[in-house]
Image (cartoon, rainbow, N blue to C red):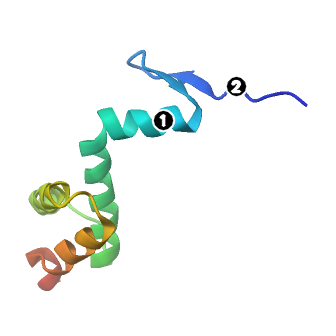
Amino acid sequence: RKKVDATSTLFNKQELAGIDGLKTYLLSDRQDQLAKAFVHKMLTYALGRPLTFRDQSDVDSITSQLRKNGDRLGSLVNIIVNSKIFQVK
């Protein structure tokens, strides 16, 4: 049985050692981007439609609020439900 080599190098020469390396990289270097992508997906689901360019300011605002509240899923649900974009859907 052969071991799997789970190491890789990203475009920016960042070395990743398996899933733990990817997790560390995302949480230390890409947390803002990860939070924004998560907000985008959750907002798309909540609204039941794809987001458009007009929605970008709402995504940015919700992402900012999420980051200030500790990146918690419960906080995100609360922020989305109380957002103007959700309430006027």
For badge 2, the amino acid type reads Asp
What residue is rendered at 34% in x and 62% in y? 41
3 with respect to 69 (left or right) = right
Image position, residue 34 (x, y; %): 32, 47
80 with respect to 10 (left or right) = left
Image mark for residue 22: 1
Task: Say if 59 sits above or below 12 in the image.
Answer: below
Label 2: few (<14), some (14–19) or many (≥20) C-alpha neighbours in 10 Å = few
Image quarter of the N terminus: top right
The furthest residue to the top: 13
What residue is rendered at 50% in x and 32% in y? 21
Task: Say if 89 sits above or below 35 in the image.
Answer: below
Q: Observer-nearest residue: 87 or 79?
A: 79
Label 1: few (<14), some (14–19) or many (≥20) C-alpha neighbours in 10 Å = some
- Secondary element under disc 2, as helix, strand or loop, is loop
Image position, residue 42 (x, y; %): 32, 67
Image mark for residue 5: 2
What residue is rendered at 51% in x and 25% in y? 16
- Secondary element under disc 1, as helix, strand or loop, is helix
